[in-house]
Amino acid sequence: MHELSVLQQAVDLAEQTAIENNIPRIAYLTLEVGELSGYLPVFFHKYFPVATENKPVFEGTELNIISAPGEALCKECFAMYNVMREEGRCPKCGSRSKKILGGQEFKVKEIGIPDDAVERGQTAEDTTGPAGA
Ligand SMILES: [Zn+2]
């Protein structure tokens, strides 16, 4: 259930951003989830409808998940390797002593704005000119 709470935070952030920028609807939301974050992308897809319930900006929004590779630097021989693929053990020297370089992140990567939304937002604000009296 960890996924639901972090997803809710990401959804709230995206909604806030949309409202501040006068964007009526978000076309897609891209999240970056590290392989070592402990979060399973399948749950984000499962909980997305729950997290976006009663939020009109998310009507028809597509959820994209980008997986960030879990990379480590071996402390013994300084080889770089993928932690998931090598099961946490250096493929060169076999050491488990390592420094994690990436793959623990969870972040909002992109908020997709429909092409027509930007124009509509601008015209809505641009009402300074005198309208035919
Ligand atoms: Zn090594």
Image: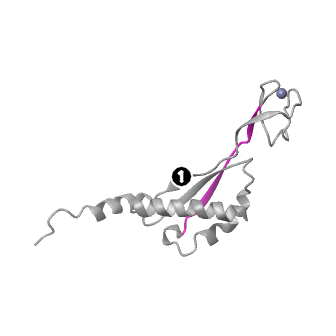
Would you say the magenta stretch is mainly helix, strand or loop? strand
Q: Amino acid at mark 1?
A: Glu
Local crowd size for mark 1, using a 10 Å CA cut-off: few (<14), some (14–19), many (≥20): few
In the image, farthest residue toward the left: 133
Figure label count: 1
Q: Residue at x 58, y 59 (%)?
A: 10
Q: Confirm whether residue 129 shows in the render.
A: yes
Provide the residue span drawn in magenta: 60-73
Q: Quadrant of ligand 1?
A: top right
Q: Residue at x 52, y 72 (%)?
A: 55
Q: Residue at x 71, y 62 (%)?
A: 2
Side of 95 where 100 appears, left or right: left
The location of residue 132, given as percent across then percent down, is 12, 70
Relative to residue 8, is residue 88 depicted above or below? above
In the image, farthest residue toward the right: 94
Point out the image quarter for the N terminus.
Answer: bottom right
Q: Confirm whether residue 27 shows in the render.
A: no
Q: Secondary structure at mark 1?
A: strand
Question: Which colour scheme appears in the figure?
Answer: one colour
Label 1 lies in ligand 1 vicinity (Cβ under 8 Å): no
The location of residue 118, given as percent across then percent down, is 38, 58
The location of residue 29, given as percent across then percent down, is 56, 58
Point out the image quarter for the C terminus.
Answer: bottom left
Side of 60 where 1 appears, left or right: right
* 120 inside magenta stretch: no
The location of residue 26, given as percent across then percent down, is 49, 62
Compare residues 58 and 78 and report the one nearer the observer.
78
Q: Residue at x 88, y 26 (%)?
A: 93
- Residue on which the image places disc 1: 110
